[in-house]
Amino acid sequence: MKKEDLRRVLEFYRAIGVESVPCEPKALPGKKAKTRRAAAGKGRPEKQKALSALFNGKIAGCTGCKLSAGRRNIVFGEGDPAARLMFIGEAPGREEDLQGRPFVGDAGKLLTSLIEKMGFKREDVFIANIVKCRPEGNRDPEEDEVGACLPFLKRQIEIIAPEAIMALGRVASQTLLGTTVQISKLRGNFHSYEGIPLMPTFHPAYLLRNRKDKALTWQDARQVLKLLGMESG
Ligand code: SF4
């Protein structure tokens, strides 16, 4: 389909209220593909250096939003700077705030078991959140907080240049895709974040309360494994 025709079709979908169109990974647009290819070509040490520069230059001591007032630690994210797969959650919780590490509470244990079931170790992937400081009482991060913090995550994604992203839960999925579509409708299909295949799935904290949906999350994970060439059929 020609670019102009595709634009018209998408405009039509938007006009009738469709906010997000699932697509096959191979059909994902090549937006920023050049930048991503350049970043992907960089070695692990260069990426580690770029991530350290981001932390030291912009994030350490950040008071960019009101979450800085109640935090104990900034949770930058952790994992392989050259990871093929990134997991992105919403915000640090109590345990994460205390330890300065993402996904270390009960939900973190569940995420770790998913990562291992997928055939990775935790240190093989990169885990981060939409905001880097804990919202009090584990409330959702507010719009101004997301607006202040998101550029840091975007830069992390640009540096790491993963082949796929799993967005964990409503806040991460809707924020990265710029949509208000429910997570139950987004999950199960690849979407595009800046040309990177993004699979929305349930947040591990939700799965702790709704164990029956673990099977759906595993379906989502298997699609990601197929994309990465780690599972056939
Ligand atoms: S949440 Fe992000 S923007 Fe807000 S203070 Fe923490 S690091 Fe800075």
Image: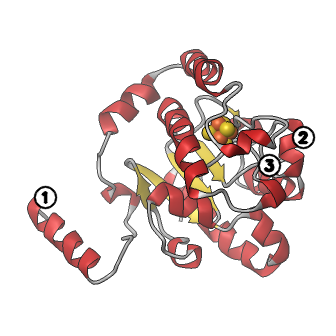
Tell whether label 1 touches label 3 (CB within 8 Å). Answer: no
Q: Secondary structure at mark 3?
A: loop
Q: Residue furthest bottom?
A: 16
Q: CA distance from mark 3 to mark 1?
A: 41 Å
Q: Which amino acid type is shown beneath numbered disc 3?
A: Phe
Residue 11's spot in the image, x, y percent?
20, 71
Sequence-wise first label, 2 or 1: 1
Foreground: disc 2 or disc 1: 2
Identify the residue shown where x is 87% and y is 50%: 94
Q: Secondary structure at mark 1?
A: helix
State the residue in front, 71 or 116. Answer: 71
Left/right of residue 166 with respect to residue 191 in the rendered view:
right
Residue count near mark 3 (Cα–Cα under 10 Å), binned few <14, some 14–19, many ≥20: many
Q: Quadrant of the N terminus?
A: bottom left
Quarter for ligand 1? top right
In this rendering, the count of numbered labels is: 3
Residue at image mark 3: 103
Left/right of residue 106 with respect to residue 90 in the rendered view:
right
Foreground: disc 2 or disc 3: 2
Foreground: disc 3 or disc 1: 3
Residue at image mark 2: 98
| Mark carried by residue 223 | none
Identify the residue shown where x is 84% and y is 43%: 97
Residue at image mark 1: 3
- Which quarter of the picture shows residue 219? bottom right
Residue 91's spot in the image, x, y percent?
71, 51
Above/below status of 93 relative to 150: below
Sequence-wise first label, 2 or 3: 2
